[in-house]
Image (cartoon, rainbow, N blue to C red):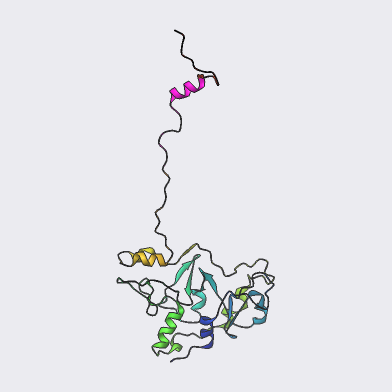
Amino acid sequence: MVMKPAWLDGLMGETFFAACLVHENQRKNERNIFCLDCCQSFCPHCLPSHRSHPLLQVRRYVYQDVVRLDDLEKLIDCSYIQPYTINNAKVIFLNQRAQSRTCKGPANICFTCDRILQEPFHFCSLSCKVNHMVYGGEDLSSIIYRFDESDLGLSQFDGLRMDGSDLLDDGQITPNSILEDPLQFKGSSCSSDSMNNLGISHEPEVVKKKKKGNGFLPAGIVLSLTNRRKGAPHRSPLS
């Protein structure tokens, strides 16, 4: 079996966004930065200790670790890994995501975990591509780049405040995102199950119907209400 580089193995196996034990009393102390030299994650307060090391910021969406495509492709060939658009930026999932149902109809699926993909992609995450190559006995050196440490240095985190009072980017991605294109499932027999797995709602949109008319009472009723004295009883005339 082909061995993975230490930084790659550590990146895919690390647990991110746990609290930093060194700065457990500080705000925003989640470990969301990965050091490629030390092969471990740390929080923004630990940045000065890794001043001269190449670093990679990991972000999080729906409890899954993602890395911006622009950052990750400086380290490894990300071709045929499906990117996802989140907050107007393309990201790559680090690891495959659990899925409870399988697709029964014809579809383009991940070579490793069978997740439905758009054409022409073959993998849904970085780990799926790497593991597929490793199990197939392929040489990983063909997809790993020699990166420039200046492009992955401390300068890329200039927006992070060391006091934790106002981190400009804490790694959390808002739900204003596009994970999958629902149109890719059109015509597939697994469309309903697959879209449920992706969290796409099938509930019909509730549209409030406008009431007909102009909202005013008929003229005759308005006249009778204005002419009627409050509390005056209506008696039949004496015969």
Q: Quadrant of residue 167?
A: bottom right
189 vs 12, left or right, is left
Q: Is residue 150 magenta?
A: no
Q: Where residue 193 sits in the image (x, y, percent)?
A: 36, 66
Q: Looking at the image, is 160 positioned above or below residue 229? A: below
Residue at coordinates 40% horizontally, 36% vertically from top-left?
Answer: 212
54 vs 107, left or right, is right
Q: The C terminus lies in which quarter of the figure?
A: top left
Residue at coordinates 51% horizontally, 88% vertically from top-left?
Answer: 5
Q: Looking at the image, is 135 positioned above or below residue 93? A: below
Residues in magenta? 209-226
Q: Is residue 223 magenta?
A: yes
Residue at coordinates 44% horizontally, 78% vertically from top-left?
Answer: 78
Residue furthest bottom in the image: 1
Q: The N terminus lies in which quarter of the figure?
A: bottom left
Q: Where residue 63 sits in the image (x, y, percent)?
A: 52, 70
Residue at coordinates 37% horizontally, 76% vertically from top-left?
Answer: 114
